[in-house]
Amino acid sequence: MNNSNPAASEFTFKPYEEKEGEEYMNEAQLSHFSAILNKWKSELMMEVDRTVHHMQDEAANFPDPNDRATQESEFSLELRTRDRERKLIKKIDESLKEIESGNYGYCETCGIEIGIRRLEARPTANLCIDCKTLDEIREKQLG
C-alpha cells in the first residue's frame, strides 16, 4: 500500500450520502471526514513503522559493490516515499485541526464550499476547484 490516495489504499469507505436540505459540514459530515483522515493517517504511520523495521532487518554490508548499490538505491527510493508520506501526514493533521476549528470543507482562498465529492476524492483539499485551477495555472506560468 505505497499509495498516497485514500481511495486506492487497502481500506475503503462508504461515500457520504447527502440528505436533501442538510447543512453543509454538519456533525455527520465532519465525523465522516474525520474517520477517513484518521484511518488514512493510521495506515501511513504503519507504513513508516514497516519501513523502519525493514531497513533495520535488511541492512547488510554486502562485499559486492553492485549489491551494495542496489540496496542503497532501494533504501533511497523507500525513504523518498516515506518523506512524501510524512508531508501527507502533516496535511492530514492540518485537515483534522480544520475539522476541530470548524473551518474544514471551505476554500481557504475564497471561503466557498469545497464540496463533499471533492473532499472524498482528496480529504486534505483546502481549495475549491476554481481556486485550485487558478493556483495551478499560476504555478505553470511561474515555472
Image: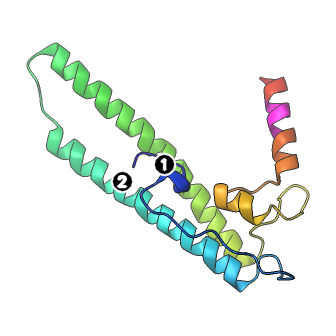
Q: Residue at image x 76%, y 82%?
A: 26
What's the residue type where badge 2 is placed? Glu
Residue 19 percent location from the top left of the image: 78, 81
Residue 7 percent location from the top left of the image: 54, 55
Image coloring type: rainbow
Q: In which quarter of the image is residue 29?
A: bottom right
- Segment colored magenta: 135-139
Q: Residue at image x 55%, y 52%?
A: 88
Q: How crowded is mark 1: few (under 14 residues within 10 Å), some or many (20 or more)?
A: many
Q: Residue 47 carries which label?
A: 2
Decide whether residue 138 is among the magenta residues.
Answer: yes
Relative to 71, is 107 on the left or the right?
A: right
List the residue tagged with mark 1: 85
- Note whether 43 is above or below 23 in the view shown: above
Q: How crowded is mark 2: few (under 14 residues within 10 Å), some or many (20 or more)?
A: some
Decide whether residue 83 is among the magenta residues.
Answer: no
